Image (cartoon, coloured by chain):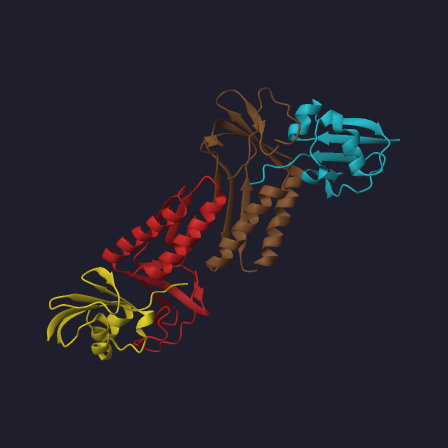
Chain colours: A brown, B cyan, C red, D yellow
């Protein structure tokens, strides 16, 4: 089981809350593809995942992946596969709202800089 | 010229100032649409970091666009 | 987060319930050592673990490991490290009670065979 | 001869029929205790698969045992 919580800081900046933009029609289709692929790689698992959308406060759960399997090796590998694929393939974008009033889209440091006082949010992890 | 509906997401949408617009473009591929709208969505991001869908189906940058298609431009996701 | 549940079958045999024998004084000391070692290998984690003792029914949670970390790679690796060490190092023994009335200590197929009609329980996983 | 208290766990205990007994043994290491009580706990298991503690501290099979020590014999754990 994997849970991604909203942390109160990232890369040294104080985060007040997070905003997830999800393009649902394709996020759902891609999410189902990820679960199907996991099922093919690890035939004996049962897996579910949930991703939140919209504004989240510190401490809220943003993403939840649950995998059950008879053997824990398969459960660990499948859970890892699913969360890694979800984080890179689904059309879901994360915007951090900082305590200082600034905000920025995560991992878009090389994209357009559209935010007032927006500084490089750097490498992310969760 | 083709009439293409373009949908912008996340940082692209914020920069374009609109979520969706219809433009008359001389474009044959999704890549052409990306480049011709680059000034609007403001991205210097190589397309390799972004993704594209046509009519709600994930597509390649080399995919053909037809008159009346909706092209969805996805900036990089949060990833890690 | 990892949860080990009591399964209703193992190696093709119908399991009715499980019995865990725990030698608490050393299980607690070894469990704390495992958590300390995890903390040294993965300095940014918080980790807890719980292991049940005594008779458990199907569907009950036997072991629970929770790890929180800023980055999921560390959380996954630490969780895996802890459950693997717990399963091999702690003085905790598992006895399966089968639906057919038979029972056997798991992974003791090469030990003394003290059980009536006890057959090789084979390789275990959870 | 040393008086050693031996504690048996799980399958060892079931086979010995007792959880604990005190024996007078000519033993210098934990391994000696294991071998001399092998018939009681009934194990053909190589000691490498089992573990031992002396006076509630995890020990090696080569650890010395003294008069009055308690030796705990642990069969293989469930593992996987």
The answer to which of A50 and D32 lies nearer the viewer is D32
Total tally of numbered discs in the picture: 0
Position of residue C38 relative to residue C89, above or below, is: above
- Whether residue B31 sits left or right of residue D61 in the image: it is right
Residue D46 in which image quadrant = bottom left
Could you tell me which quadrant the C terminus of chain B lies in? top right
Looking at the image, the residue that sits furthest to the right is B1
Point 41% across, 63% down: residue: D80
- Whether residue C97 sits left or right of residue A15 in the image: it is left
Q: Position of residue B69 (x, y in %)?
A: 81, 35
Looking at the image, the residue that sits furthest to the bottom is D39
Position of residue B17 relative to residue A123, above or below, is: above
Q: Position of residue C78 (x, y in %)?
A: 42, 49
The answer to which of C52 and D63 lies nearer the viewer is D63
Q: Position of residue D51 (x, y in %)?
A: 29, 66
Point 26% across, 72% down: residue: D12
Residue C120 in which image quadrant = bottom left
Position of residue D47 relative to residue B28, above or below, is: below
Point 71% across, 27% down: residue: B41
Q: Position of residue A72 (x, y in %)?
A: 46, 58
Could you tell me which quadrant the N terminus of chain B lies in? top right
């Amino acid at each position: 089981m994997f849970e991604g919580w909203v942390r109160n800081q990232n890369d040294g900046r104080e985060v007040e809350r997070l905003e997830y933009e999800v393009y649902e029609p394709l996020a759902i289709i891609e999410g189902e593809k990820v679960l199907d692929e996991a099922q093919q790689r690890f035939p004996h698992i049962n897996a579910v995942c949930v991703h939140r959308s919209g504004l989240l406060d510190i401490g809220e759960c943003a993403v939840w992946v649950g995998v059950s399997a008879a053997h824990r090796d398969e459960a660990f590998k499948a859970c890892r596969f699913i969360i890694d694929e979800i984080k890179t393939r689904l059309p879901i974008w994360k915007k951090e709202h900082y305590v200082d009033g600034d905000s920025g889209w995560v991992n878009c440091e090389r994209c357009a800089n559209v935010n007032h006082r927006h500084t490089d949010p750097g490498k992310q992890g969760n | 010229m083709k009439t293409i509906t373009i949908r912008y997401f996340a940082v692209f949408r914020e920069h374009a100032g609109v979520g969706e617009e219809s433009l008359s473009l001389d474009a044959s591929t999704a890549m052409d649409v990306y480049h011709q709208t680059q000034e609007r969505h403001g991205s210097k991001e190589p397309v390799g970091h972004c993704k594209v869908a046509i009519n709600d189906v994930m597509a390649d940058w080399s995919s053909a666009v037809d008159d009346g298609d909706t092209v969805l431009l996805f900036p990089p996701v949060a990833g890690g």
